[in-house]
Image (cartoon, helix red, strand yellow):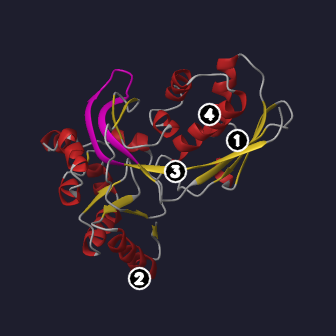
Amino acid sequence: MGGTLSIETPCKTNLFLAVEGRMPDGYHLISTLFVPVLDGPRDTVSIDFDAPPGIAFESSNAELSGQGNLCCKAAKAYFDAAHSEASVCIKLEKRIPVAAGLGGGSSDAAATLLLLNRKLALFDAERLREIAVGLGADVPFFLDPRPSQAGGVGELLEPLTFEAALPPLLIAFPRFPISAAWAYKNLDWAAARADSRSIGDAIDALRSADFVRSASLLRNDLSHAVRAKFPLIGMIERSLLDAGALGAQVSGSGSSVFGAFRSASARDEARAFFKNSSDWQGVDAF
């Protein structure tokens, strides 16, 4: 059964994120539009199946070591569901920033499930999705990362029924993390309820490949608290707009910010601006 399998796994952003309510267990009901950032940073997850009994884990990011990592949790969930003993060593080459609103941990967890099932073929797609839901609301999206509408806590996925033309995106990461739990806890409900932009309109703009309209419909109800707490976030948004972005918004719960551009060349010019400007040496642009 031995050998090693590897996969590169992408990050994501939310072109639309409306918080619609809070459940008794503390989780929030959302309406969101997930899109993969295919030309953004990617992690590499590898699994060695010639390993001693148990689940071993190694990462290029020392802060992610230990069994609390989502890769380990995913492997444990997989083998628990199979009522089987694990003998794997998982290696993670980390490039997606941590706690940046880009779904890196969820992406790694999904990659782990996909690799295990590619090798062992114990579950069908629906059962694998059920295991993914138990790991986190974003994890099912990364099992098949394509533009999708999502409800519930993010786990009720509906891939878009058309080939979405996505505006070229530039991600700017200010090199500090923001806890998703903090962002939801400090949600500005008044600002969220005052925003009338709808996910249906956002999807229609993608259907018609209207990048200008898409940019005007970027919404993230978590962004108000994030900007208020971290003024640098708003500064990055304004700089993206000054650099030619049609619109800019916080990615997920932050701290990353993305700009949506009219063309790939305009996006690339903005990336060069961030990389070459002495004012933005503390911000990674990709």
Q: Which residue is mark 3?
A: 10
Using the numbered discs, state the Cα–Cα distance from disc 4 to disc 1 in whole angstroms.
Answer: 18 Å
Give the number of the mark in front: 3 or 1: 3
Hey, what amino acid is under mark 3? Pro
- Of mark 3 and mark 2, the one earlier in the sequence is 3
Tell me if mark 1 has few (under 14), some (14-19) or many (20+) residues whose alpha carbon lies within 10 angstroms of its own. some
Disc 3 to disc 4: CB gap under 8 Å:
no
Please identify the dominant SS of the magenta region.
Answer: strand
Tell me which segment is drawn in magenta.
14-35
Marked residue nearer the N-terminal end (3 or 1): 3
Circle nearer the N terminus (3, 4)? 3
Q: Element at badge 3?
A: loop
Answer with mark 4 or mark 2, whichever residue precedes in sequence.
4
- The residue wearing badge 1 is 66
Q: Verify CB contact (< 8 Å) between mark 3 and mark 2.
A: no
Answer yes or no: is residue 136 visible: yes
Label 4 and label 2: CA atoms lie apart by 41 Å
Residue corresponding to mark 4: 113
Decide: few, some or many residues near mark 4? Use Cα within 10 Å; few <14, some 14-19, many ≥20.
many
Separation (CA) of disc 3 from disc 4? 15 Å
Callout 4 amino acid = Leu
The residue shown at (58%, 58%) is 95
In this figure, which residue is indicated by the disc labeled 2?
Answer: 277
Q: Is residue 189 visible?
A: no
Give SS at disc 1: loop
Indicate the position of residue 251 as horizontal and vertical percent values.
37, 52
Q: Residue furthest top?
A: 83
Please state if 104 lies on the left or on the right of 185 as rendered: right
